[in-house]
Image (tube, rainbow, N blue to C red):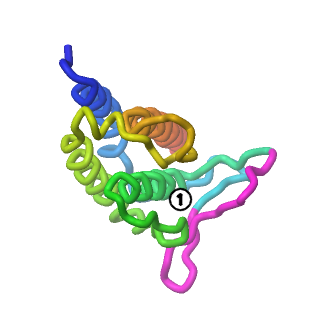
Amino acid sequence: MPDTPRELLRWQFDLTWSLFEYHLERLEPGDFLWEPGPLCWTVWQEEGVWVPDWADTEPDPVPVPTVAWVTWHIGWWWSVTLDHLRGHAPREREEVVWPGADEAVAWLRGLRSEWLEVLDGLTADGLDAPASFPWPPDSGLTVAHTAAWVNAELMKNAAEIGQLRLLRATEN
């Protein structure tokens, strides 16, 4: 059993990542832009740059995301989380660019490495510090809550990618 809250968060992250890796290593280039239905969010090339579908207010019904959109989404929230925890100005959503199907998995694995550097460097005091993301600074939540949120958000996104990959496999 992990001895410290950071070790527990790291254990939980490693478990989550191993489940995510199961799907990442099986993704094929055609999986990324496959649209599972008529109402989807995806990414589009505009002037050589991949741009995600987005709405400031969640539409009803909510569009089904493509694997490309979900991988962009992971890259966006994870990059911004890293910015906050490193004390950097957080990037705007438009500044986080999906690298394309050929580079998406390597991009996510790179974010994993960056995350582990930050997570492994957190002390008990660092985990107890007030968090400013993804909730308001006056929420009373801590950096430990943010780390737990990363684990939960990644698990949710891993399940989405896994389900999309499996659905596409049934069509082939």
**Vertical placement of 26 versus 114: above or below?**
above
- Amino acid type of the residue that numbered disc 1 sits on in the rendered structure: Leu
Tell me where residue 156 appears, x and y as whole percent. 50, 35
User: For residue 69, which quarter of the picture?
Assistant: bottom right
The residue most toward the top is 1
Residue at 23%, 45% in the rendered image: 116
Residue at 28%, 25% in the rendered image: 5
The residue most toward the bottom is 47
Callout 1: few (<14), some (14-19), or many (20+) C-alpha neighbours within 10 Å?
some
User: For residue 2, which quarter of the picture?
Assistant: top left
Q: Is mark 1 on a helix, strand or loop?
A: loop
| Quarter of the N terminus within the rendering | top left
Which residue is under mark 1?
33
- What range of the chain is rendered magenta? 43-60
Residue 33 seen in the figure: yes
- Would residue 123 appear left or right of 41 to someone viewing this image? left
Pick whichever, 154 or 26, lies toward us. 154
Q: Magenta stretch containing residue 49, yes or no?
A: yes
Tell me where residue 105 appears, x and y as whole percent. 33, 55
